[in-house]
Image (cartoon, helix red, strand yellow):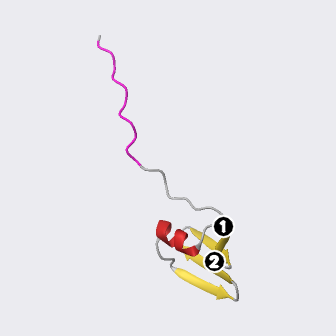
Amino acid sequence: MAAIPPPPPPTDTPPPTIALKQTKAQVVAIFGQPTKVVKLATKEIDYYPDMKVTFVNDKVTAIE
């Protein structure tokens, strides 16, 4: 009986991720334009289909 060959390596790329302290430009480069933006003084909340990203002074401070 012949040996079963190993499966090919995965071709999928990992899902895009963001991190705290990234800039808005970095987030937009990764996820594209948000579906909705709410601006409150130095705070901005960008809404994406499956998450919301909060920026203070153009830096990510929260990801929900």
Which three-letter amino acid code belongs to the residue tagged 2?
Answer: Asp
Q: Residues within 10 Å of mark 2 (few under 14, many from 20)?
A: some
**Place of residue 7 in the rendered image (x, y in percent of width and height, measured from the top left):** 37, 31
Identify the residue shown where x is 70% and y is 89%: 41
Residue range of the region highlighted in magenta in the rendering = 2-12
Q: Which residue is mark 1?
A: 21
- Tags 2 and 1 touching, CB below 8 Å: no
**Place of residue 56 in the rendered image (x, y in percent of width and height, measured from the top left):** 69, 78
Q: Quadrant of residue 6?
A: top left
Query: Would residue 49 be seen by someone viewing this image from the given angle?
Result: no
Identify the residue shown where x is 63% and y is 77%: 58
Relative height, residue 64 to residue 47 (above, below)? above
Query: Would residue 55 be seen by someone viewing this image from the given angle?
Result: yes
Relative height, residue 38 to residue 28 (above, below)? below
Relative height, residue 13 to residue 27 (above, below)? above
Identify the residue shown where x is 40% and y is 48%: 12
- Of the 4 image quadrants, the one containing the N terminus is top left
- In the current view of this chain or complex, which residue is farthest to the bottom? 41
Q: Is residue 14 magenta?
A: no
Instruction: Between residue 50 and residue 33, name the one nearer to us.
Output: 33
Q: Which residue is mark 2?
A: 58
Relative height, residue 16 to residue 55 (above, below)? above
**Secondary-structure class at tag 1:** loop
Instruction: Between residue 63 and residue 49, name the one nearer to us.
Output: 63
Q: Residues within 10 Å of mark 1 (few under 14, many from 20)?
A: some
Q: Quadrant of residue 51?
A: bottom right
- In the current view of this chain or complex, which residue is farthest to the top? 1
**Place of residue 25 in the rendered image (x, y in percent of width and height, measured from the top left):** 53, 74
Q: CA distance from mark 2 to mark 1?
A: 9 Å
Which three-letter amino acid code belongs to the residue tagged 1?
Answer: Lys
